[in-house]
Each structure stands twice: as structure tokens, then as C-alpha cells.
Image: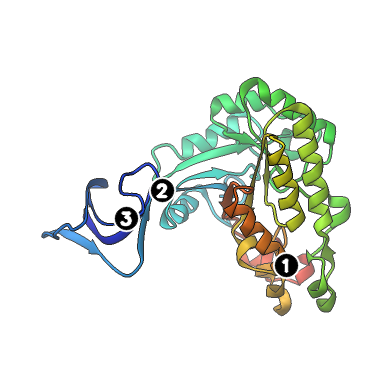
Amino acid sequence: MNILIKSAFIIDSDSPHNGKVMDVLIENGIIRSIKNKISSEKNVKVIEGNNLHVSCGWVDMQVSFCDPGFEHKEDIESGMKAAASGGFTGVAMVSSTNPTIHSKAEVLYVKNKTADSIIDVYPIGTLSYKQEGEDISEMYDMQQAGAVAFSDDKKPIKNAGLLMRALLYSQNFNGLIITHCDEKSISNDGNMNEGITSTSLGLKGIPALAEELMVNRNIFLSEYTNAPIHLANVSTKKSVELIRDAKEKGLKITASVNAYNIALDDSSLKGFDSNYKLNPPLRTKEDIEALKKGISDGTIDAISSDHRPQDIESKDVEFDHASN
């Protein structure tokens, strides 16, 4: 199929057309021409409208495709189609499957199932064996099989010594460690951000402190080991400040925020809609402004969708029991 996109703003820093409004002709999936004006011909589908934008394919660095083990929520095929529909040509798939992606075999399962697919799927292996938080997983073997990073996903690494050893070990093969920062002894099964809204709703709150303590600890571990670490799911103002300070010191820290944490605040839960029960929780407007500033000044390096499908049975229950 041939497609002509009319008057689109081009976003591609490597292109001489970056920042310009141009016509783009695509023939059989390949861009053939980019000009100020291209005349449409027969058998060409024309796409035109107001405020059109064209960019390179996007990459989402945190998605769950629930496969294997939770295919009643989604499988790899449906996940890839959803990603492609949203303009994503690459996704990093988290390790929270059943079994978890904790060895070469599970990495190869994902690689083989996504070979020659419409998008690129990059598996993330577990940091600890089976996400149990006790022993380091077979990171080197998984990297050789195609794993791009190592993380226990939304299970924070409680054992600081384990994380330190993983950071030291990963340097032998340029591995990347990704962590979710949450001190469980403080967040302790809370339902939403701790604050005025949680108090007014009578819901158990999750203090920002639970995240910030772990952000601080993980920064210290990265500094001690001189190893890079990625802090995922950043959601609070203080976390942004800690990361900014670490980067100014020249530490090997990167960070990402989930889209919902910059789009919605904790007032969204006033109707007790469990669809807004998320991890990390929706925070305050002040946190959102700090996150946006962090994105604009480079403190935060990426925005993730945190695409994480749930079935109705996981959400259509009492708020306390709904999945996040």
C-alpha cells in the first residue's frame, strides 16, 4: 500500500527535515519522498488533517505482556499489536511472567515468539532468581541470549547487599540494573498516596518517603560500586531532587517516570474507581510539576507507559483488594 501524509510536522533530530512541515510519501512501507508538496496519485491513500506529526518509531522501556502464565490478561501477540497501534516499534518486556524470566530458557522463549514480528521486543531478565530477592540470577547467560537489562520489576530489592553484588557483577559485561524504589515496611499495602485526599477518603496511604528512602539508598549503592543504575517508576518531588543532585555529582544514574504519574493526581481516586489504583500511586499536583520539570531539564531520562493489563476480576472488587 502507498500512503501520502500531507502537511505533517517532522520530529527526527537526525533528519534535515526535523522541525519542518512536509509531505511524506510511503511506498510499500518505505519512505520514498519528503517534500514541501507531493501530488497525490491513483492508488495512494492520503492522510491529512490538522496538527499532524511524524516521528521515528517510539520505544517503551516498561511493558508487561503477561506471557507466559497470565494469558487471560494479554499475550505477546496482542501486546505487540497494541504497541504498534500506539506508534511503538520497540518495547522492553518486564520479567513478571510465570515462570519469571530468570534464565536463558525464558529469554529465548520471548525472543523466539517475537522473531520477525511487527515490533521489536526486548526481554528484561530478573535481577534475583525467580524474583525471590535472595540470589543473583543468571544475568550473563541471559544477556548472551538477548536480555537487555535486569530487574525484579515492581518487587523492590530489599537486600542492599544483593543489589550491591548485582551492580558489581553487572559491570563485567556492561549489564544494566533497573530498580523499583519502594520500602515495603513503610508502604505496607497502602492503597493510594498518603496525604489530604487519602485522609478524607479513609484509605490507607503510601508515604512518599517509602520511595525516597530507596531512591537514596540505590543512588548510594551506585556511587559505591561505580556502576550504572536505572531508577524506574519515579513519582515524587523529593525523588526528582535526589536524582538531580546525583547527576550533578556525575553519578551513573538514569531515571524514568510512568505516563500516568504526570497525567493524573491523587484526586482521581475520589470516586473510589479502582482503575486509578496504581503502583506507584498517583501523587499530588506538586509532585507532577516536579516530575515535568525533571523531564524538561534532563533529570528524568524517559517516560514509560507501564502497560500492564488487568482482567475484570482483578479490578471489579473491593478497593482494598483490587490489583494495582
Visible in this render: residue 306?
no
The residue that label 3 is drawn on is 20
Res. 57 mark: 2
Residue 121, position in %: x, y? 49, 41
Query: Nearer the observer, disc 3 or disc 2?
Result: 3
What element does badge 2 sit on? loop
Residue at the location (27% across, 66% down)? 48
What element does badge 1 sit on? loop
Res. 284 mark: 1
Coloring scheme used:
rainbow
Amino acid type, mark 3: Lys
Would you say 95 lies left or right of 146 here? Answer: right
- Residues at badges 3 and 1 in contact (C-beta under 8 Å)? no
Quadrant where the C terminus sits is bottom right
Amino acid type, mark 2: Gly
Residue at the location (36% across, 59% down)? 53
Query: Nearer the observer, disc 3 or disc 1?
Result: 3
